[in-house]
Amino acid sequence: MINIKFKKLTHTAHTPQKMTEHSSGFDLYADVDELIIQPKDVALIQTGISLEIPQGYEAQVRPRSGLAATHKIGVLNSPGTIDADYRGEVKVILFNFGNESFTVTMNMRIAQMVFAKVEQAELEESASLEETERSDGGFGHTG
């Protein structure tokens, strides 16, 4: 288990919470006055918190299944990545995939945040790459 420090940036910010003991993610809450997302539109939603993520980890911001199934609301860049060296406010890019407007209200659960270990890598340029059975077969190559 890792410990993640967080800071409330406003007096209205809500502490991220796990809804059950074995939940993978922490729910993130809107820290905005009422905001309407029109159909097929995007909104950047403030959470009022910032994080101190240990080096070697990231936070992934993911949609909430309830919002997706009931209201067709998703996280546009899912999963969104919060890097270990970022200390600014956590914000969530919500997209309204539906045909009706959607209202975001203060302290509404808007997304979930999962912490994951990140393997560090170095890129090495090469004139050739090892061949595989798939080789350069891309999108839809298996049918």
Image (spheres, rainbow, N blue to C red):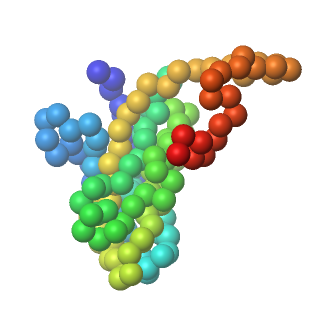
Quadrant where the image shows the N terminus: top left
In the depicted structure, whether residue 116 falls above or below residue 92? above
Q: Residue 39: give x, y in percent of width and height.
A: 43, 79
Q: Which residue is drawn at the image coordinates 53% and 37% (left, top)?
A: 83
Q: Residue 64 sits in which quadrant? A: bottom left
**Is residue 10 shown to the viewer in this render?**
no
Q: Which residue is drawn at the image coordinates 34% and 68% (left, top)?
A: 72
Q: Which residue is drawn at the image coordinates 27% and 49% (left, top)?
A: 27
Counting the numbered discs, the total is 0
Q: Nearer the viewer, residue 77 or 86?
A: 77
Q: Nearer the viewer, residue 113 or 49?
A: 113
Q: Which residue is drawn at the image coordinates 14% and 41% (left, top)?
A: 20
Give the residue at the far right of this rendering: 127
Q: Residue 46: give x, y in percent of width and height.
A: 43, 60
Give the residue at the far front of this rendering: 143
Left or right, residue 13 beside residue 132 = left
**Is residue 77 shown to the viewer in this render?**
yes
Q: Residue 12 sits in which quadrant? A: bottom left
Left or right, residue 134 beside residue 35 = right
Q: Residue 74: give x, y in percent of width and height.
A: 39, 61
In the depicted structure, whether residue 143 falls above or below residue 30? above
Q: Residue 137 sits in which quadrant? A: top right
Left or right, residue 14 beside residue 83 = left
Left or right, residue 105 beside residue 121 = left
Q: Residue 125: give x, y in percent of width and height.
A: 81, 21
